[in-house]
Amino acid sequence: MQAHPRISFEDTSVAFSYKSNAALRKANFIFSLVNHPWISSIAIGSTRLALKLHLPVEGLIKKTAFDHFCGGVSIDNCDDEIRTLSRYGVGTILDYSVEGEASETGFDQTLEETLRTIRKAKSNPQGIPFSVFKVTGLADMELLEKIQRQDALSPAETEAYQRVQKRVDTICQLAHASNIPVLIDAEETWIQEPVDALAYEMMARYNRGKAIVFNTYQLYRKATLQNLKDAFREASAKGYHLGAKLVRGAYMEKERARAAEMGYEDPIQPDKAASDKAFNEALEFSIANLHQMAFMCGSHNEQSNLYLTQLMEQHGIPGNDDRVWFAQLYGMSDNISFNLAKAGYKVAKYMPYGPVRSVMPYLFRRAQENTSVAGQSSRELILIRKELQRRRSA
């Protein structure tokens, strides 16, 4: 099967068309930093220490990594970036990235902020086509772990879980009423089962006419491809649409370390080739079953995105079909996002936002991810420098 003739992920003039020269130079600085693991490690350690000592570093962080990877400190601060992306045909998924709010008050605050993102999306569905939340933003992890182990819950824990169910339903109910699809992000394997159960309960309730609630499938897990197929069969049997976000995964080191420590089978695929194979098979399965599902390809892998465009062409599915979306993180893989959008595909960027200090765990993960994923920061750097050179020569 030949590559789609309209797609080239090498076209940096399209990839960085929304960035000024200053923004591009900042990106060059950031990816140069994370391209050297030892420098990146020192920078992360120093920043953590400075924040712990309450040194005045937030302004510096905001002008560098925060501005590159995040939309703003509040939902309304993201407006300029949302408008900019929208001009180039790229949607925004507002992602409230405050972490560690492990209290009932914190869970309720996350609920209210998530509802705000849905209301904002309703006012601008072209610019903000999806909403998103993590169940761990609304529930205690120990409670979810206990439910997965099928331990008996105390009366207080039962009441706490009922509040979790109510929060999730409140979000999905508003998403359905607003006609804004909502993505439920993936979690670690040891709490994923109750998250799945909540997702399927919401799908059965709100996905009758079309996919509004989307569950996330981490294909670097051995069991995930079969889980996706089982979920589709159940949706078909019960008469609702499956919503699926396909990703490779985010917790590999943590998953493997826990499996080794606790003596159970490693749930992660043995190597990258196995993950890639599972991901491609999930794309094939989803495309073949579009009559009863919608899905998002959440990937920074150029070959996976290209393969999906080929599958769509092979099956006669137009690029602007609402049931097929591509998504990348804000500040990363612009060569994929903007070239896909220009070719007429449905594309969205995950845009984290929140107070600088609260979003730091997210920023640390981005730095570590770009440092550890083979070739990720190098690829970003090559493209950024190629565009800087092109602009200098123009």
Image (cartoon, rainbow, N blue to C red):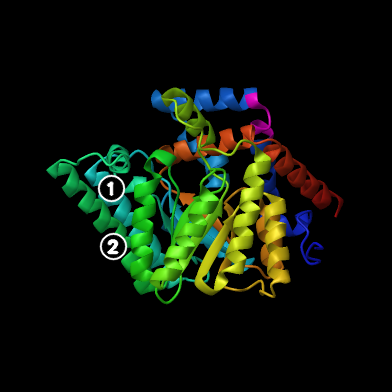
Q: Is residue 300 visible?
A: no
Determine the image quadrant of residue 32: top right
**Residue closest to the eye, 13 or 312:** 312
From this view, report whether residue 318 is shown above or below residue 58.
Answer: below
Determine the image quadrant of residue 112: bottom left
Residue lying at 68% horizontally and 42% vertically, measured from the top left: 273
Q: In the orientation shown, which residue stands out farthest toward the left?
A: 155
Please give the residue where the numbered disc 2 appears in the rendered image: 170
Q: Check if mark 1's residue and mark 2's residue have beta carbons within 8 Å.
A: no
Task: Locate residue 282, reporting x and y percent.
Answer: 59, 56
Please tell me how crowded label 1 is: few (under 14), some (14-19), or many (20+) other residues with Cα within 10 Å: many
Tell me which amino acid carries mark 2: Thr
Residue lying at 32% horizontally and 50% vertically, measured from the top left: 110
Task: Locate residue 286, reporting x and y percent.
Answer: 58, 63
Please give the residue where the numbered disc 1 appears in the rendered image: 107
Residue lying at 48% horizontally and 25% vertically, measured from the top left: 260
Disc on the earlier residue, 1 or 2: 1
Please tell me how crowded label 2 is: few (under 14), some (14-19), or many (20+) other residues with Cα within 10 Å: some
**For the residues marked 1 and 2, what is the alpha-carbon distance in whole angstroms?**
13 Å
Task: Locate residue 258, reporting x and y percent.
Answer: 45, 28
Task: Give the magenta part as a residue range.
Answer: 32-37
